[in-house]
């Protein structure tokens, strides 16, 4: 039996698809212990992960206490707050309050929630620095595709000159099928919704809002831009026609929704057929231009509960190694 003092203790705030994905992955990691889980209906203290996952699948409440999510953050003894509530780009809530309380109480924060970082990146990173704790957010950009930690760690000796990429799997799926099967936008979107690739209300994805949030996070993290969502020049994919896609292909190009971090733009761009950013389906890809290492391109799954959970757990384990 493992000594409880050697365990790295987590709370999971938010228990939708990503929070459940984290719980599933943590079950196989004996060095990690989930001490509390909070969803919109209450808090489970010292949960049995198999039991709470089963309750969630059955649509049953998981709560076994009268605590709130903020109570957990403030008074339950743990090392990391895994904040995975839904993204709200208007004011970052309720995640922003969760972030602030966790950092003020000297708890590390690991998140997939873009809202607080888009709303208050500078405030939160400064608060984490002042309190001497970690704020990690690999999962906010690209799901399982490594980009933030790649730049911070592997490329630490290089200066980043630019970042651009395909950062939304829903848009990439729609554009890929439109181009390869000569289908119209409305037909592909409807089928993507039926398959669960696109939301019932796809506005957040197809208008470029999701990509813009990721651009803001990367711009603030690596170019000290202090940008907000309103600073991004935004064009989505809703007006892309079949004629435009076929004309591009005849000339040796594909059309991709590209987020350009240095320029703070999101818009459809012509990408050469042989370029590494020409990824298909729901894949994401990002090209990082550096002064010493040249251009490096990474690709991977940009969404999915387990994929996003894998990025969250990479941040958690990095914090744990730092403690050890």
Image (cartoon, grey):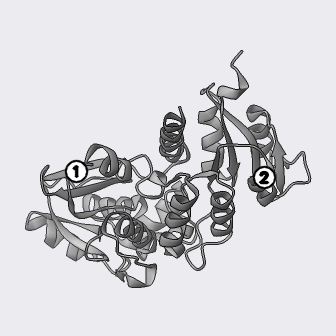
Q: Nearer the viewer, residue 285 or 163?
A: 163
Q: Residues within 10 Å of mark 1 (few under 14, many from 20)?
A: some
Residue at 13% across / 57% down in the picture? 291
- The circle on residue 297 is 1
- The circle on residue 15 is none
The answer to whether residue 245 is left or right of residue 174 is left
Of circles 2 and 1, which is in front?
2
- The circle on residue 72 is 2
Residue found farthest to the top: 1
The quarter of the displayed image where residue 113 is located: bottom right
The answer to whether residue 113 is left or right of residue 78 is left
Instruction: Assign a secondary structure to mark 1.
Output: strand
The quarter of the displayed image where residue 104 is located: bottom right
The answer to whether residue 187 is left or right of residue 17 is left
- Could you tell me how far apart the alpha carbons at marks 2 and 1 are, in whole angstroms? 40 Å
How many numbered tags mark residues here?
Answer: 2
The answer to whether residue 263 is left or right of residue 34 is left
Instruction: Assign a secondary structure to mark 2.
Output: helix
Q: Nearer the viewer, residue 155 or 252?
A: 155
Q: Position of residue 292 (x, y in %)?
A: 12, 52
Q: Residues within 10 Å of mark 2 (few under 14, many from 20)?
A: many
Q: Position of residue 167 (x, y in %)?
A: 36, 61
Q: Pointer 2 and pointer 1: residues touching (CB < 8 Å)?
A: no
Q: Nearer the viewer, residue 285 or 13?
A: 13
Residue at 77% across / 60% down in the picture? 70
Q: Position of residue 141 (x, y in %)?
A: 42, 58
Sequence-wise first label, 2 or 1: 2
Q: Is residue 132 above or below residue 93?
A: above
Q: Is residue 45 above or below residue 191?
A: above
Quarter of the image where the N terminus is located: top right
């Amino acid at each position: 039996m493992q000594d409880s003092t050697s365990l790295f203790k987590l709370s999971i705030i938010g228990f939708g698809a990503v929070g459940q994905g984290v719980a599933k992955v943590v079950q196989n990691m004996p060095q990690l212990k989930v001490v509390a889980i909070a969803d919109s209906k209450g808090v489970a203290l010292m949960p049995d992960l198999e039991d709470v996952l089963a309750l969630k699948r059955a649509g049953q409440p998981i709560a076994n206490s009268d605590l709130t999510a903020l109570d957990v953050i403030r008074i339950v003894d743990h090392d990391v707050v895994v904040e995975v509530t839904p993204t709200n780009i208007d004011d970052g809530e309720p995640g922003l309050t969760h972030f602030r309380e966790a950092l003020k109480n000297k708890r590390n924060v690991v998140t997939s929630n873009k809202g607080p970082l888009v709303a208050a990146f500078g405030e939160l990173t400064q608060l984490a620095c002042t309190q001497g704790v970690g704020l990690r957010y690999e999962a906010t950009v690209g799901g399982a595709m490594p980009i933030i930690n790649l730049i911070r760690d592997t490329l630490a000796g290089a200066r980043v000159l630019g970042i651009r990429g395909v950062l939304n799997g829903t848009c990439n799926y729609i554009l890929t099928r439109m181009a390869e099967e000569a289908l119209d936008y409305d037909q592909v979107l409807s089928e993507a919704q039926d398959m669960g690739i696109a939301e019932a209300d796809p506005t957040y994805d197809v208008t470029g809002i999701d990509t813009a949030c990721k651009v803001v996070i990367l711009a603030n993290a690596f170019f000290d831009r202090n940008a907000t969502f309103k600073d991004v020049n935004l064009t989505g994919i809703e007006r892309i026609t079949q004629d435009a896609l076929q004309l591009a292909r005849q000339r040796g190009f594909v059309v991709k929704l590209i987020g350009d971090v240095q320029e703070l733009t999101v818009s459809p761009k012509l990408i050469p057929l042989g370029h590494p950013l020409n990824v298909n389906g729901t894949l994401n890809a990002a090209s990082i231009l550096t002064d010493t290492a040249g251009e490096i391109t990474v690709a991977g799954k940009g969404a999915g509960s387990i994929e996003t959970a894998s990025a969250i757990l990479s941040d958690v384990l990095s914090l744990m190694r730092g403690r050890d």
